[in-house]
Image (tube, rainbow, N blue to C red):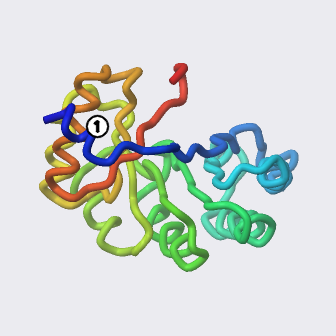
Amino acid sequence: RTAELLTENPLDKVRVYASSGCRYDWDKDPDQVVEEAVGYADEGWTAFKMRIGTHWEWSGVTVDQFIGLAKRVTDAVGNRMGLMLDGNCRLTEEQSLSIAKALDEMGWTWFEEPMKRDPDAYARLNASVEMPITGGEPFTRVEQFEPYFEKNALAIVQPDAGVCGITECFRIAERAHELGVDLAPHSWHNGL
């Protein structure tokens, strides 16, 4: 079956994105991430994934401050690049909902792992916005995705073959395909 999936509709190309937005510091220069996004757009990248920045508790950052920064990124490059946000599982459900609604209104592509992994909380968040909620990068088995599949908690699953292995990544892909869930392979701490 896996071989059939690979040969049914082979891709001529695969879209990749600039994955960064992890250097900016809320105390020193949060707008550095805007400059970074502009630099990637100028290099020809068509998509950019940023993070939420240094730990908010360190600098007293609020959801409104972050939404303002996301708006500046959108204004600077949103017409040239798809934009995604990785919450690094650091937000509360309330913070995640406020940010997701704002990003959804701004037309962002997805919101990745905004809060600690809880299928019920992710299901509520995923149902609250049109923008896809994504996650699953540390999962090593398809069975770990099942509670998320059952609750429609992730619009896009993101297994990392460097974590779960190629064979298991294919199993996850097959299951996601079976359920009509999109898959965007994750790769951060390893070479493709």
Note whether 93 is above or below 19 in the view shown: below
Q: Position of residue 43 (x, y in %)?
A: 82, 47
* Residue drawn where x is 38% and y is 35% of the image: 137
64 or 16, which lies in front? 16
The residue carrying pointer 1 sits among few (fewer than 14), some (14 to 19) or many (20 or more) residues within 10 Å by Cα, namely: few
Task: Answer left or right for 24 relative to 109.
Answer: right
Residue type, label 1? Leu
Task: Answer left or right for 121 relative to 83.
Answer: left
Note whether 152 is above or below 106 in the view shown: above
Q: Secondary structure at mark 1?
A: helix
* Residue drawn where x is 71% and y is 49% of the image: 45
Count of number-bearing discs: 1
Q: Quadrant of residue 159?
A: top left
Note whether 83 is above or below 148 in the view shown: below
Q: Position of residue 112 (x, y in %)?
A: 46, 51
Q: Would you name the residue on which mark 1 appears?
A: 6
Task: Answer left or right for 178 relative to 165.
Answer: left
Which quarter of the figure is the N terminus placed in? top left
* Residue drawn where x is 35% and y is 74% of the image: 128
Q: Position of residue 190 (x, y in %)?
A: 52, 20
Q: Position of residue 163 (x, y in %)?
A: 37, 22
Q: Residue furthest bottom?
A: 105
Q: Quadrant of residue 46?
A: bottom right
* Residue drawn where x is 62% and y is 61% of the image: 82
172 or 22, which lies in front? 172
Q: Quadrant of residue 62?
A: bottom right
